[in-house]
Amino acid sequence: MKIFKVILNRVPRPLLIKLSYVVRPFIAFYLKGNNYTDPIDNKSFRKFLPYGYEIQRQNVLSPSTLSLERHRLLWLYLTNETNFFTSKKKVLHMAPEQCFLSRFKKLNHEYITADLDSPIAYVKADIVNLPFNDNSFDVIFCNHVLEHIQDDTKAMKELFRVMKKGGMGVFQVPQDLNRDVTFEDNSITDPKERAKIFGQYDHVRVYGRDYFDKLRSVGFKVEEVNYSQKISSELSSRYRLMEGELLPVVFKN
């Protein structure tokens, strides 16, 4: 549906976030069914919504939580492979996703959200100059943020600085696994050109497989987790997951 592409590219993201809270219940009610299930809230639908700023992916956006494939994969990983939902932690969530925000708030964590522009983040903070002490957080989520940041190395160093020793994080980015080396060109500033080349009007690079090594270069231990391999093809289809997507799970030793 072209209308969704137009909305994504024309409506400023902060306003889009606010509007989504209003329209989401109506869309979820309209699309109720039994073909696909969002594992985050276990609600089922006859179809999911399309999503994409440049190339639209069909049947990927959950009408109830507004989760995408990457959110649902992360939820399953955290649920089945970590103690995130059962052990109290101090958590930093950069640019918090709507599908997680209210659920993470209810957990027994010291939960801090931060972003420069998001209307749903509690702390207004620039990722390249975070207002937190060294070694502050047990867990850090920073998903689909770094591709927006000109100096992503400085941002990674800041995330490393504020993570506690023994801490972990998940730093998802749009990643072309067929590309060995990240592509960026700071001379590309036109939003339409950025959308064509980087996939979104406010992205400044396309990460390749070297993304993991860049995280390692600032000090993180990195696991390239192909968690979708552990999920049956039947469930993967029902949850609308992306086959072969890798979770960048980082640790600070």
Image (cartoon, rainbow, N blue to C red):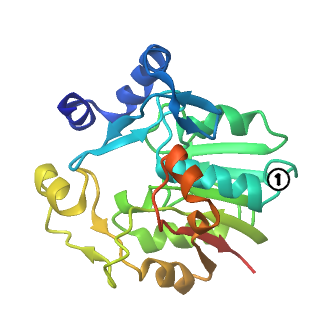
Q: Is residue 86 above or below residue 218?
A: above
Q: Is residue 105 above or below residue 114?
A: above
127 or 92, nearer to the observer: 92
Which residue appears farthest toward the right when viewing the image?
Answer: 87
User: Residue visible at 64% across and 72% down?
Assistant: 250
Residue 65 % position (x, y): 54, 32
Seen in the image, is 83 located left or right of residue 127? right
Tell me which corner region of the image, top left, top right, bottom left or bottom right, holds residue 52. Answer: top left
Seen in the image, is 121 located left or right of residue 85? left
Residue 117 % position (x, y): 43, 40
199 or 135, nearer to the observer: 199
- Label 1 SS: loop
User: Residue visible at 41% across and 83% down?
Assistant: 210
The residue carrying mark 1 is 89
User: Residue visible at 73% across and 43% down?
Assistant: 111
Q: Is residue 68 above or below residue 62?
A: below
Seen in the image, is 68 located left or right of residue 184? right
Tell me which corner region of the image, top left, top right, bottom left or bottom right, holds residue 23. Answer: top left
Tell me which corner region of the image, top left, top right, bottom left or bottom right, holds residue 193. Answer: bottom left
The amino acid marked with disc number 1 is Lys
> Could you tell me if residue 137 is visible in this image?
no
- Disc 1 packing (10 Å; few <14; some 14–19; many ≥20): some
Q: Is residue 12 above or below residue 160?
A: above
Residue 159 % position (x, y): 59, 66
User: Residue visible at 62% across and 39% down?
Assistant: 100
